[in-house]
Amino acid sequence: MIEPAVADLWLPIAVPIMRASWVSPRKGQANVSQMHYARQGVVTEEMAYVAKRENLPESLVMEEVARGRMIIPANINHIGLEPMAIGIASKCKVNANIGASPNASDAAEEVNKLKLAVKYGADTVMDLSTGGVNLDEVRTAIIDASPVPIGTVPVYQALESVHGSIEKLDEDDFLHIIEKHCQQGVDYQTIHAGLLIEHLPKVKGRLTGIVSRGGGILAQWMLYHHRQNPLFTRFDDICEIFKRYDCTFSLGDSLRPGCQHDASDAAQLAELHTLGELTRRAWKHDVQVMVEGPGHVPLDQIEFNVKKQMEECSEAPFYVLGPLVTDIAPGYDHITSAIGAAMAGWHGTAMLCYVTPKEHLGLPNAEDVREGLIAYKIAAHAADIARHRPGARDRDDELSRARYNFDWNKQFELSLDPERAKEYHDETLPADIYKQAEFCSMCGPKHCPMQTKITDEDLEGLEKVLEIKAGAAELTTVKLDKAD
Ligand code: SF4
């Protein structure tokens, strides 16, 4: 259950239904994808909305969507969606994973986790439910309550539909579930089509083998049936389904490394090459694509990984999980991965999938969702500043002004997690009077260096004095030189 202390902090989410009138004229058309319209020179309502949110010209949004460098995941059946963009031209985004497992959770709790994720700034949310509940019911409840795009991994439900029996799972089961998710309004689906049967031997020698759940299911399927990955062989059929709903591909990286040792190996790069081919195949259908990436990567290999993805996948938006830059901190993997995420964002990754402190240890609870999201909002924002995205530093500057002016309430307000900032401040100085105090308990009232308000006028005065002194010293040197 969600802890009451955190639950109390939730704000109601107003889900506008503005999209109903936008999408109704499109229903029944053969291809309703944003990319399809953009390639015809049409600025859809979603593109115009995104342009406003991102402070970008509408024409640029349209061109980027047409080019495939930006996506707007917006299933026509997700009416309550507030459209957003993922791409190099827009701000770096953050995804949060929720989902019921066979051991824990129910539909109400998942909707609560969704609200919490949105409250702490998730730009998209993936429902990774694997069982223990009615998966369709949970998904419908999540989509109905969500203003942000919802992503899913249909392979989980495909396996669930045959009661976990790989031998009974056939190609049509996959496609049936994929279409069902589209009908329900899922905005993007992780499709593990890049894992080919010939890639599997390349996993030999890895420390942690295959760590993608979906990838593991498909590998087992191929090993059992000795046939090619059905998501690869039926890829064009999946494109035909996606274009009818404007569902976006999130091309899954089944062979992402699960540890530092396995990073950037032959298996990972072979799959990435196939993901590039699939990207261009989906684009031929005017279907939107982003590409998923690792995982666990040492700091010095992150830039290589981002550049390689851009090159192989013709700059389709990159969506990475972490990456974790060391494997030795279970319990703190929101930190080990946020370090990698900031660097990945800086080098051009478009969306970061959050990692919570429970990664590798258990199903995250509400507090873990909060910790993970804040860590990733920091990483994404740091990347935006480093990439000099217009206006990215405005909030930092405003907070710094408030800090220098000892405007504590404003400082809290501008924080990524205002409740946490206030809670920590008030731990030692709870009284209201301290909200104007010119110090905090760290350096104390007598030693706060920010009390020394050195003004620009003071510094200008000092500059003049220094100039005069420098002039006098020069004169002395000249005199001494002459005397020599
Ligand atoms: S007391 Fe120290 S930590 Fe606190 S506001 Fe002043 S400089 Fe900052």
Image: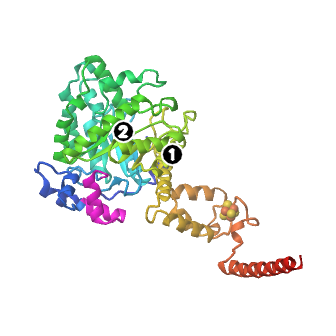
The structure residue drawn at horizontal position 26% and vertical position 18%, both measured from the top left corner, is 226
Magenta stretch, overall SS: helix
Q: Which is nearer the eye, 139 or 394?
A: 394
Residue 331 appears in view: yes
Amino acid type, residue under disc 1 in the picture: Ala
Residues packed near mark 1 inside 10 Å, few (<14), some (14 to 19) or many (20 plus) = many
Where is residue 371? Give x, y as percent.
50, 46
Indicate the position of residue 227 as horizontal and vertical percent values: 24, 21
Q: Which residue is mark 1?
A: 338
Q: Earlier in the sequence, mark 1 or mark 2?
A: 2
| Residue 25 image position (x, y, % from top left) | 12, 58
Q: Which residues are magenta?
A: 46-70
Image height check: is 467 above or below 128?
Answer: below
> In the rendered image, which quarter is residue 431 located in?
bottom right
Q: Nearer the viewer, residue 313 or 109?
A: 313
346 displayed left or right of 275: right
Which of the labelled discs sits on residue 99, or is there none? 2
Q: Nearer the viewer, residue 285 or 444?
A: 285
- Image quarter where ligand 1 lies: bottom right
- C-alpha separation, residue under disc 1 versus residue under disc 2: 21 Å
Indicate which label's residue lies in the foreground, 1 or 2.
Answer: 1
Q: Is residue 234 left or right of residue 293?
A: left
Q: Is residue 67 magenta?
A: yes
| Residue 3 appears in view | no
Quarter location, residue 253: top left
Q: Amino acid at mark 2?
A: Gly
**Quarter assignment of residue 133:** top left
Q: In the displayed structure, would residue 186 be above or below residue 20? A: above
> Seen in the image, is 76 located left or right of residue 339?
left
Q: Nearer the viewer, residue 421 or 396?
A: 396
